[in-house]
Image: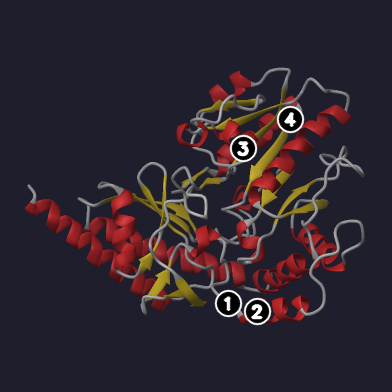
Amino acid sequence: MIPAVMPTYARADLVFERGEGAYLFGTDGRRYLDFAAGIAVVALGHCHPHLVKTLQEQGAKLWHVSNLYRIPEGERLAQRLVDATFADTVFFTNSGAEAWEGATKLVRKYHYTRGNPKRWRIITVTNSFHGRTLAAISAAKGEKLIKGFGPLVEGFDQVAWGNMNELRAAITDETAAICIEPIIGEGGIKAATPEYLRELRRVCDEFGLLLFFDEIQCGYGRTGRFFAHEWAGITPDVMCVAKGIGGGFPLGAFMATEEAACGMTPGTHGSTYAGNPLATAIGNAVLDIVLADGFFEGVERTGKQLKAELEALVARHPAVLEEVRGTGLMLGLKCVQPSDQMVPELRAAGLLTVGAGENVIRILPPLTIGAAEIAEAISILDKVCAARAAKAVANG
């Protein structure tokens, strides 16, 4: 019989009863070091005191009123994001997929409003991931994502990651935008070079296209800057964010320049729950922490330390690990042996990680992670890799 919860997840048989900082505590009585952070969502660790206090205070006052009325906490959060980024305006959503969908609508409406309705197609890249909606899987075109869900939504042209010649050749008079993750997450932790991002900006300017960044996973401080594209010294026209924006509370957004958002007038887009008082109060609490002086610099330092430790680990276990990918605290271990076997072995040893494409294990700790937790994680990884290497030798 089918279970009450639809069986679309291959869940581990593990239940957590509470969390604190970088740790989760299971009903099995064990403590787990969380280097998955809810897939880069729990950016400030579990039960951060400032977020808990905000949740309790706002939860006792007001949760939901709908977007028929003004929401001061949402207005404040939007203004703070505008002040800290390239954007002039923000639309709040409940999830990353909704943020990506909304940004896609904005792209089409921009060209329509500017008198170019034939421009509606978006160029994406291989190994991308933008969510699980029908349009999002149509944009990413991954075999595991799209199998059985056809026909796909039209309007997306895919080119090879990093190949500017192929990208230029794909531009037609119907092209509206280029959409890319500055660091590919689900597809295997692949960071775009600054020059690649700069060239995308130049191409968009040359052809009158919108540059559309998906920073749902790589944004909100994870690389040591507020957003990953900042390392390239360029800005997009539209960007979607989520995951870390709510520190674990469901919240997302798409952000744009005034020019790009020219078509987003009353009645063109909406959401019942999105940007509610509770979600945006917590979003402001997250910003209180991440925009504090020195926070991003601390993430950058910690990320360099962790990456150096992981690179040393790779050098010690070349039969198990091939390379370290990524930057900041968005890192990946490309495995020689099957990564989908190592993830449960690490979990059994007390370290939570998450898989990705190209045989990669994602390392996504909370941005507040410290030296002691890094040392503990490296120790667990070292032991699991040593056991795997020994087993490989024993099996010939």
State the image quarter where residue 248 is shown: bottom right
The one of 374 and 27 positioned closer to us in this rendering: 27
Residue at mark 3: 136
Label 1 element class: loop
Circles 1 and 2: CB distance less than 8 Å? yes
Q: Distance between the residues labelled 3 and 1?
A: 31 Å
Earlier residue among tags 3 and 1: 1
Q: Distance between the residues labelled 4 and 3?
A: 20 Å
Residue at figure coordinates x 57%, y 66% from the top left: 43
The disc placed on residue 47 is 1
Label 4 element class: loop
Circles 4 and 3: CB distance less than 8 Å? no
Label 2 element class: helix
State the image quarter where residue 276 is shown: bottom right
User: Where does residue 295 sit, x and y in percent of width and height?
Assistant: 61, 71
Q: Nearer the viewer, mark 4 or mark 1?
A: 1
Badge 4 amino acid: Leu
